[in-house]
Amino acid sequence: MFLINCPYCGERDQSEFSCGGEAHIVRPKQPTELSDDQWAEYLFMRKNIKGVQFERWNHAHGCRKWFNMVRDTSNDKIHGVYKMGEKPPVE
Amino acid sequence: MTKYRVNKTKHVDQTKIVSFNFDGKSYHGFEGDTLASALLSNGVHLVGRSFKYHRPRGIMSSGSEEPNAICQINEDTDLTEPNVRATEIELYEGLKASSQNCWPSVNFDIGGINNFISPFIPAGFYYKTFMWPKSFWKKIYEPLIRWSAGLGKSPTKPDPELYDHKHVHCDVLIIGGGISGIIASKIAAKNNLKTILIEDKNILGGSTIFQKNENYKINDKYSGEWIDEEIAELKKLDNLTIKTRTSLAAYHSYNYLLAKENISDHLPLVKRNGGIRQRLWKIRADKVIVATGAIERPLVFNNNDRPGIMLSNSVKKYLDFYGVSCGFKNIIFTNNDSAYETAVSLKEKGISVEMIDIRKKSNSKIVKNAEQLGVKIYWNSTVVNTFGLRKIYSIEIMNLSEDGSNVVGNKIRINCDCLAISGGWTPMVHMHTQSGGKLDFREIDQTFIPNEIDKNHINVGSCNGDFELEEIINNTNKKVKNFLKVSETEFDNTSVINSKELNKRNIWLLPNYISEGKCKSFIDFQNDSTAKDIKLALREGFKSIEHVKRYTTTGMATDQGKLSNMHALGIIADTAGVKMGTLGTTTFRPPFTPLTFGSIVGRSVGNFFDIIRKTSINEWHIQNKAKFENVGQWKRPWYYPINNEGLHEAVQRESKAARDSAGILDASTLGKIDIQGTDASEFLNRVYTNAWSKLGIGKCRYGLMLNEDGMVYDDGVTTRLGENHYLMTTTTGGAANVLSKLEDYLQTEWPELDVYLTSVTDHYSTASICGPNSKKILKKIFPDKDFSDDAFPHMSYQNGKIDEINCRIMRISFTGELSYEINIESKYGKSLWEKCIEAGKEFKITPYGTETMHLLRAEKGFIIVGQDTDGTMTPIDLQMDWIVSKKKYDFIGKRSLYRSDTIREDRKQLVGLLTDDPNEVLEEGAQIVSDMSKKPIEMIGHVTSSYFSPNLNKSIALAVVKSGKKMSGQKLIVPMENKNINVTVSDSVFLDRENKRINA
Ligand SMILES: [Zn+2]
């Protein structure tokens, strides 16, 4: 059970949050100009890596804000949280 | 006093007699006993039968590692509990316990036959033996296995007791109240840190508390006396919470831990009085100090499982803590020094004891102490056999060869009534590994010890591999100081005397003159797996420890391999000729000891199982005898039976009334989202499939929302309240998800949009009135308002007032009838409803529930998201092409609508179905086929909604059928269990195709 440092509220229990999958997948601005393959890449393909992963999280039972989190999926170490639109704190 | 109670100790009050019953026989013990110590004081060793071979088994240990003494307690009461370890139950007046695995009795049972056929029950026998014939499995094998395994009985009645959850935060949590945990707690609490110490026993002090040996002294006191004084001081500390009878169940990441406190389990049943039985502590600790100690290892040799064979340190605990001697002619079989403490303790009390040591010699102080007391020691020897069916009575020993791989010389037979065994110690690293910590292998004593990298938790004492008193005290002090950043402590100059172990020798599987195949050398006592099974698994090609474990079931019983894992690993390493450290260990998973379901669930039972949401009109529905349906957490009226009506009759009546005169529905549960901001129109354009920019103020529009994959997600009517202000409605079940999805897009994809979303579902109550007389009813409620079609057309909204209370009137329709919805602040919901009923009386206004609503919608072919759709339907599949804007450049899901998969013409599409017999109503979910001749018959669709329509006087159904759009008029078949129903594909709109009723 993680202790997540919501960038708006501070440290809260994981049960207040929901995970929204991989971060930094930008919705294409002109979807109609994409081929099926390109659209499928956006729609379906996720890295799901073992190791440091950039994820979207939502403070669902708190401030309802979405933010990003850097988590090592192999040991659940959280390397940082940052607001939407901000640069990741680590590589 | 019974003859086995040889010693008076302060931990057992021998003036307070406690009577209890075991396997139908009455016994006495004392206050302070466990069930196990009380049984042993009565000379009872035999407590059960083994799982596979049904061999007699006795109490083996004194703690949570106990593999044999597993009981069912308080059978035939509501409080009965299976799988309880006798070594952990505190004895109380009237306790009733029985052996779990011994039908028909512990002394004789039928399953014992397995012992004689055991050559036919090798490793993996479940996988091999019971494979065929297949038909035997269900009727013969499975009942046989379940019946003979005897895994205890679940209680049959609801649990009458209460369970609690408690959340706590602390600076430091210390797990384990033995010597190292006590030192750590004292340092933490004295340095202004909010500290919690948890201990699973009812008293602190671990195994130090019963130490009284010249060779182990702290500051010139016996270590037992020293720790008594430390505990007394500890109890005075303000910053420290001590929780005894509390066992750690799980250590999750970020120092989140679960611990179970037993509050009333040690009390006689009559004294429990409905209080709280157990409390689950949910602890978030800044720092965690693990001091869980070590478990003594057994030795693996032929017939090492007879009653009377026990762990050496447990024999000592029964003697020095409980005052019970497990035997009068004891033999201790060891590979290390710690067992000599047991020998000295026995000898000092005048009890006969001899030692068998696999080592060639040891000159440590404790060994010399034993020799001086006259204890006979057989060096370089091993036990090769044991005798005694229900209790051990003699053993055979032989000398070991130089390298320990074989036995040499003659067998010597020695009589005994208790064989204490000690194969060294295994640090309890479960907590460390549960938290994500890794282990290192220490060659010298073949132990896995914690490799610490997490800066917020450490391991101290013997769970860290520090086994000797001096190491424990000094290392614990040093580590805790460093961990908590403390510069000096009272333990800095502690003087410690202890006997140091000088010689070590470890043999995982002791050699024998009897061939390996004929030896019964048990590794996992609870699951009955032997060294032979492990070797067979290796010969059959299993290499990974995880596979060997599952194939042989070693370490998979309720003790989770506390005693067996190390030996299994050692034997695998020896057999495969690899180093044990390279094999790794199996994974230790929570819970460390079993948790009750009650403690997991806590107070979330009965009415508290889930939140119940009710509309403000709920009371009226109850008074009017509504039957309710759960829609998510909401209670919605399902139908309103009059007299003795069933569902069908009530729904037929309600549906007819709604179309013939007037019906009223409580629509308060529909999700409502208030949308404001200068970009609100643009936002709706992006989230709905149709266009919103041109919707005038005061107008309403139906919208369909897709997922990005093009599949229908939700629907509802949105009303434009002002230039930059909309009120969106969603399905009842989808409300929360729609809001969070919209928030997601706003915050992450379109942060440039000026839009604010607020859930107002609970703020407004909604009464929906439909039917040809609805306009007249509205006119009565709002006499000043012009309800003509020109002044108040379909799909528009106006503000209104009822007795000075503001409300919104929407002319929108759920049912295809002329209808109006009135929204009012929730607190006025019930009076609004009553007013509508009153005004509608002369038109026989009929309240209707969800079932009628679904029927009325089905008549019109209006979809119900979640019933007619299932996350795989596009608007095109639903024949709702009309709602998908061709002009809009983009909206959520648009691009997916022409992916190669979504444009397939053979997708399942929504159609109507009419049964050839108009009285035959299809079953929702029924499969649809077209060709019965070709086997296997292809399923081409299924029925999604089906009703008998009273307004059309025939059966109607909606269904999804492959290529259904092109099938109009085609005959299909719905095969049921006893008949095939012939149907014809029709249009999905059954009633009023011209939409005339909406303006009726
Ligand atoms: Zn927050």
Image (spheres, coloured by chain):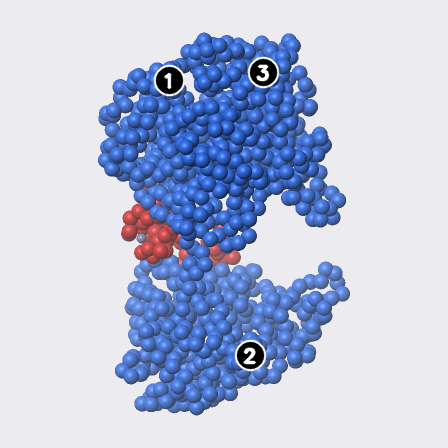
Chain colours: A red, B blue
Q: Respond yes or no on whether mark 2 lies under 8 Å from ligand 1.
A: no
Please tell me whether residue B389 is drawn above or below residue B124 in the rendered image. Answer: above
Q: Is residue B443 visible?
A: no
Residue B384, position in %: x, y?
62, 18
Residue B560, position in %: x, y?
52, 35
State the mark number for residue B382.
Answer: 3
Q: Chain of mark 2?
A: B
In the image: residue B376, left or right of residue B387:
left
Q: At label 2, which amino acid type do we have?
A: Glu
Residue B686, position in %: x, y?
40, 66
Q: At label 1, which amino acid type do we have?
A: Tyr
Residue B573, position in %: x, y?
57, 23
Q: At label 3, which amino acid type do we have?
A: Thr
Q: Are marks 1 and 3 in contact (CB under 8 Å)?
A: no
Q: Residue shown at 29%/79% (left/top)?
A: B806
Q: Respond yes or no on whether mark 3 lies under 8 Å from ligand 1.
A: no
Q: Chain of mark 3?
A: B
Decide which of tag 1 and tag 2 comes sooner along the chain.
1
> Badge 1: how crowded within 10 Å, few (<14), some, or many (20+)?
many
Q: Quadrant of residue B727?
A: bottom left
Q: Quadrant of residue B922?
A: bottom right
For the residue pair A89 and B131, the one nearer the viewer reads as B131
The kind of secondary structure element at disc 3 is: strand
Q: Give how far apart the Cα atoms at labels 1 and 2 are.
A: 84 Å
Mark closer to the observer (1, 3): 1
Q: Quadrant of the C terminus of chain A?
A: top left
Q: Are marks 1 and 2 in contact (CB under 8 Å)?
A: no
Circle 2 sits on which residue? Answer: B645
Q: Chain of mark 1?
A: B
Circle 1 sits on which residue? Answer: B216
Q: Give how far apart the Cα atoms at labels 2 and 3 are.
A: 82 Å
In the image: residue B792, left or right of residue B301:
left
